[in-house]
Amino acid sequence: MALPESNTRKPQNDFILSERNEPKDGSPAGTKLISGMTGVGWAMVHLPYGGVVKLDIGKALAGTTEFQAWWIDPRDGSKQACEPKTRQITDMDFECPSCGTMEDDWILYLMRA
């Protein structure tokens, strides 16, 4: 899956409303850090252990609420469409297909519709 406008991508975490597991003392984050990236018309979140993530879609996709979403399995590149677990005006929860171990990492890919 090629990312649209991938040359505009930048690390961005302010649209991730869930705890990102970022240490407050400046120590290394380790393997459980939830991280985000955005570009023109798309956003991604990596969840190294799966689980649920709450996002501000308005920040992730620059003010839109119309979008498509997929879970991408980084182990084999497969993808599956997904819907938010909860759908508010800005805060939406997405639940990974699996969670708990390093074998359950997922990438949530959002694209403006």
Image (cartoon, helix red, strand yellow):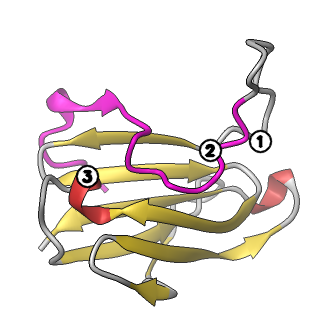
Task: Say which mark, if any, is on residue 59.
Answer: 3
Reading the image, the residue beneath label 2 is 34
Q: Quadrant of the C terminus?
A: bottom left
Q: How many marks?
A: 3
Q: Residue at point 47% right, 87% down?
A: 86
* Element class at badge 2: loop
Residue at the extreme right of the image, as rendered = 101
Magenta segment's dominant SS is loop
Relative to 88, is 52 on the left or the right? right
Q: Residue at point 50% right, 55% down?
A: 17
Relative to 44, is 63 on the left or the right? left
Residue 91 forms part of the magenta stretch: no
User: As displayed, is residue 79 above or below residue 74?
Assistant: below
Q: Residue at point 15% right, 48% down?
A: 4
Across and down, in percent, residue 52 comes to 64, 70
- Residue nearer the viewer, 90 or 93: 90
Of circles 3 and 1, the one toward us is 3
Q: Label 2, label 1: how many angstroms apart (C-alpha)?
A: 6 Å
Q: Disc 2, disc 1: CB below 8 Å?
A: yes
Please state which amino acid type lies under the numbered disc 3. Lys
Please state which amino acid type lies under the numbered disc 1. Lys
Please state which amino acid type lies under the numbered disc 2. Ile
Q: Earlier in the sequence, mark 3 or mark 1?
A: 1
- Residue nearer the viewer, 84 or 106: 84
Reading the image, the residue beneath label 1 is 32
User: As displayed, is residue 6 above or below residue 99?
Assistant: above
Q: Residue at point 26% right, 76% down?
A: 68
Q: Which residues are magenta?
A: 1-22
CA neighbours of label 2 inside 10 A, class few (<14), some (14 to 19), many (20+) = many
